[in-house]
Amino acid sequence: MKIFSVIAAILIIAFCFSFSLQQSKDYNNLYEGAVNDLDKQLSLLLTTIKKTGIATEEDREQIRKEIRSCRLSMKGVDFWFRYFEPVMYRKINGPLPVEWENEVFEKFEPPYRREGAGLTLAEQYLEEENISKDSLSALIRSSVEALATFRADSITQNLGSYHHFFLANRLYLLNLAALYTTGFECPDTGSVIPELRSMLKDVKEIYHRFDEAFPSMPLSTEYLAQYNKAIDFANNQPADFSLFDHFTFIKDHINPLFRMNQQFITRYGVVTKNYNDYSLNNNCNSIFDKALYVPQNTKGIFSLIEDEKLLKEIKQTGKLLFYDPILSANNQRSCVSCHKPAEFFTDTTQSTSLRFDRQQHLERNTPTLINAIYNHLIMLDGKHISLQDQVKDVTRNVEEMNSNEAEMLKKILSCKEYKDAFKKFLKYTPEEKEVTLSHIVSAITYYYADFSRHSAPFDDAMNHKQDIAPEAKRGFNLFMSKAQCATCHFVPMFNGVKPPYIGSEFEVIGVPEDSGFHKLSPDKGRYKVNPAHETMNAFRTGTLRNIAFTKPYMHNGVFQTLEQVIDMYDAGGGAGKKLHVANQTLASDSLKLSAAEKKELIAFMHSLNEKIIFEAPPAALPRSGNKELNSRKTGGEY
Amino acid sequence: MKKYTFAISSLFLLAVVSSDSKCGKKNQTEYDIPEHVTQENRALFIERAEKGKILYKLYCGDCHGIFTKGKDSIPNFTKTQIDNYHATALIGLDPKNHAVAQKMSSEQIDYVITFLRIRKVKK
């Protein structure tokens, strides 16, 4: 009898095991099937290119049609591919032929040149003049070759556990909010929503097979119900992406799904081994929360200090230093000279600020410091990798503050208040024996970074706290579609950092030297840091948060109003205005925005004005033992 | 059981602290710097490594080996592992194990990495 029950138990266990094995095999099969399908479609496309060629418009139309069906297969694997191997995926779905990248975990290394190929580029190539069959085939062959990577054991073994799933799903949801509905990587704007629908459906099947394969770590019924609602919503919306209600789609569907997925990540103890998760914060329940991704280190040398009281003291000292012209060689210039706290930490009156010599002007417009911490590379050309490096550079720059470490430290430590404070802080930085420039600049970055924590009415609307005007919502929907803003200014920071928020992007838009577009701005931009054909005149995409308060605009402050800026984009950038811009990353065609649409875009931008509480300047600056220094003025003189 | 581990680890720590203070000179770390490095940069390397050593002892040493008498062992890190991605990436992906390292500034991490890289490993 006993033996029977043991055998029965073994049989049951074996059965269950094989059942679950079968289930997890089904999940694997779904992946394999999707990869094979894409492979088959790409091969068909290659055959067509070879057979029919590209000589007549009819031939090209046939190829376009096949590219579109390939794209649908591509969307079927996007969920996994983009997460598993984003660099290789760019051979299948690359937005640009060449991208120079310096992701946050590669910051210490020189920028990487990464090549794209695949369907998006092939579709764009078809529209060019003097095209060749071979070049077109090469773009597709790269995609076929890239598939080998996604079949490798090192990739497919991820499918054997549940960890990858919730992380890939997070990236998928973030891309639903930031990329998939905007026409990013989709040159034919008419296909954006049809592709979205197809993808939503494909991922539903992925969800289904995953839940069967990993029944102890399921997506909740609440999640699946919410997902079905999202599908229904997308299916019932207009197929034209300019008429699609992006605002409601994100607010009522994607963001709630993101919140639930974040809870799964915590609840199931999901562990990552993937660089895509480097910046993302597991303890953040909304895409429109400033905690979504890890910003720059604001504490610098004080990074290991956690005592709130002490941190408050550091911040206060940082504030004094921020207003103190003691940092400059002539004791007349402070951080406030250009970054005026009451003006959103920028200077709204100058296109470009005065140089140290008071005669000439600097080359570039002063950027706002608010939300600067959400850039992975600092300065418009990405010269610096940390906030602290940037402050060091300004204080030593002959055109700006013209000081040096020894002089600054001597003057600062001649003030008793500073000396006492830094002596105290020094105890908490055991690796340093004396006060250094790092202590000074870290107090400064810690002070100003605090002003980046506030939210805007747009965030509150997305988080169901308080609604915004219908005009602003319409503006957002245009922003995400016809106006093509969101393909560079990404949700939710509206800067150049796109999901998974590990790098800052640079763009060439052909900003003129004068508002009459007589000449291209001679500033080489990113080229100065990373000389390459693609980086000439490229600048890091800035945030649109608080943009209504941070005029003048562009790297050289050439425009005074948002209307002027929108008009420039509407015209197709510098190239659209007939300037010679090599390698403009912005389409040179007109966006054909109406006056009413431009107004709506501006209404949306106003909803990004953050509710920042500014502070009064310090009552007095610390007294120095050197009497000459005591006549210096709070905030400096120019 | 917990008490027991606590007792052992505190004894261990005590031993470390006392051995450190008593024979500081003996415990001086020797560094292995490639020959082509100039004299000036050599000093810079050592300065950074010494800062890294202080941080390492305070924040990393509890788990990754301890400076014990006669034997100086840091497990888990080979020189190539340290070179790969400057190790910062490695730290970034494991929040549970490297909470302290994640809080460090990139400069501080750089000091620690420099220390690990150029210190002479006793065999």
Image (spheres, rainbow, N blue to C red):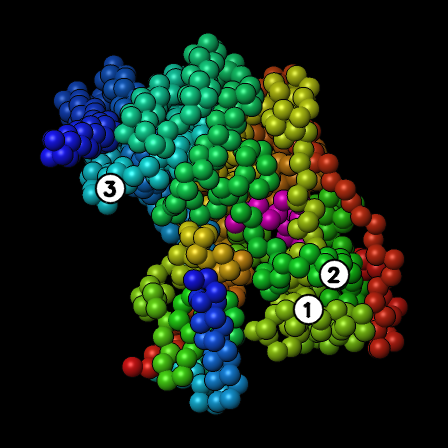
- Disc 2 element: helix
- Disc 3 element: helix
Name the quarter where the C terminus of chain A is drawn.
bottom right
Q: Chain of mark 3?
A: A
How packed mark 3 is, by other alpha carbons closer than 10 Å (few <14, some 14-19, many 20 or more), is few
Looking at the picture, does residue A93 appear above or below residue A527?
above
Establish whether labels 3 and 2 are both on one chain.
yes
Q: Amino acid at mark 2?
A: Glu
The mark found on residue A313 in the picture is 2
* Quadrant of the rendered image containing residue A519: top right
Percent position of residue A405, x then y: 65, 73
- The magenta span reads A362-376
Q: Chain of mark 2?
A: A
- What's the distance in space between the residues labelled 1 and 3, CA to CA? 49 Å
Task: Report if residue A547 is visible in the image.
Answer: no
- What's the distance in space between the residues labelled 1 and 2, CA to CA? 9 Å
Do tag 1 and tag 2 residues touch (Cβ < 8 Å)?
Answer: yes
User: Magenta part mainly helix, strand or loop?
Assistant: loop
Establish whether labels 1 and 2 are both on one chain.
yes
The mark found on residue A425 in the picture is 1
Q: Residue at x 32, y 29 (%)?
A: A215
- What's the distance in space between the residues labelled 3 and 2, CA to CA? 50 Å
The answer to which of marks 3 and 2 sits earlier in the sequence is: 3
Q: Amino acid at mark 1?
A: Phe
Q: Is residue A96 magenta?
A: no
Looking at the picture, does residue A136 appear above or below residue A318?
above
Q: Is residue A368 magenta?
A: yes
Q: Read off the residue under disc 3.
A: A157
Q: Residue furthest front?
A: A1
Left or right: where does residue A183 sit relative to residue A406? left
The answer to which of marks 1 and 2 sits earlier in the sequence is: 2
Looking at the picture, does residue B29 appear above or below residue A618?
below
